[in-house]
Amino acid sequence: MILHAIETGNFKLDGGAMFGVVPKALWSRTNPADTQNRIELAARSLLVEDGDRLILIDAGMGNKQSEKFFSHYGLWGNNSLDKSLNTVGFSREDVTDVFLTHLHFDHCGGAVRWNNNRTGYELSFPNAKYWSNKSHWQWATNPNPREKASFLTENLLPIEQSGQLFFVAHNDNGFVSESELGFGILFVDGHTEKQMIPHISYKGKTLVFAADLLPTAGHLPLPYVMGYDVRPLETIKEKDVFLNRAADKNFVLFMQHDAHNPLLTVKHTEKGVRLLESLPIETLNSL
């Protein structure tokens, strides 16, 4: 197995929304804000070479929305999905599986693109199976008012209509040790219904794609929960269990949204689980 970080692009979101009830005086210590109160975020995907499969975990926000839409998100940097794929020797056509942790636009927007004459949409990865789970798909395609702006029809219907949509199985205990993709999946419900957190066995370690269960290193304290989460008290419980297990088992956390700390390890302290080490992305294949 070989792993590649795929930088799909960087953006910004309001720091208050990213940290909920936590005062700015506290969260700005780890995530300083710009003049519009926005913090820097990444949209970092993971490409997994595993035998005959080339699995992309999440696809960023893409580029098919309007200039007005993107103006709200302070795009910055020069990263793109195609550029990152090409850097590691692949193209969109090579991807066999697209695994979507959940269907908010910054995670799945890049999975669908305009067709050549911009009259409709097509799958960005024409040869891939697209993976979600039935509970989350139903949740996203019948959205509640709180999340409706994040579940965009143009990101979802083309996948459904393509015939390339597949659902992974989940069980009542919230963890599948080996999914159809060959890695474990933790199902969590605080951020959104049945978000999927991949657990990949790699070189004797467990690498966890943290997605929106832990957006940045600044979110390690339990009360530091996003205002976007639909069930914030559930998020706290899920983070507590997950972070203690991460510290116990020496997990390596692959940080999707932390622009400056791409890989983390954590430890137990008197104040709870906290940062042990921040690792550069170059160490991904030498863990």
Image (cartoon, grey):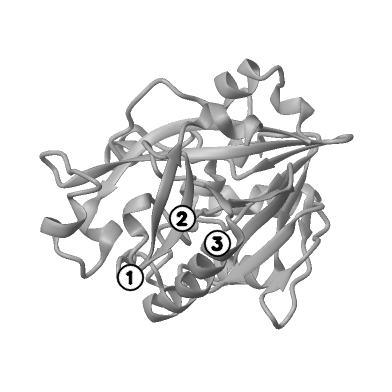
Q: Residue sitting at 10 percent across and 39 percent down?
A: 35
Residue with the mark numbered 3: 246
How many residues crowd mark 1 within 10 Å: few (<14), some (14–19), many (20+)?
few
Q: Is 99 placed left or right of 261 in the picture?
A: right
Provide residue 163's location: percent of width, then percent of height: 81, 51
Which quarter of the figure has residue 138? bottom right
Q: Residue sitting at 46 percent across and 73 percent down?
A: 240
In the rendered image of this protein, does residue 257 appear above or below residue 132? above
Helix, strand or loop at mark 2:
strand
Question: Of residues 99 and 156, which is closer to you in this image?
Answer: 99
Residue with the mark numbered 1: 270
Q: Is 178 placed left or right of 118 in the picture?
A: right
Q: Looking at the image, do the residues carrying marks 2 and 3 touch, with CB atoms under 8 Å apart?
A: yes
* Observer able to see residue 246: yes
Q: Is 47 placed left or right of 179 in the picture?
A: left
Question: Of residues 138 and 284, which is closer to you in this image?
Answer: 284
Provide residue 116's location: percent of width, then percent of height: 63, 23
Helix, strand or loop at mark 1:
loop
Amino acid at the residue labelled 3: Ala
Q: CA distance from mark 1 to mark 2?
A: 13 Å
Residue 266 - label: 2
Q: Is 251 placed left or right of 25 in the picture?
A: right
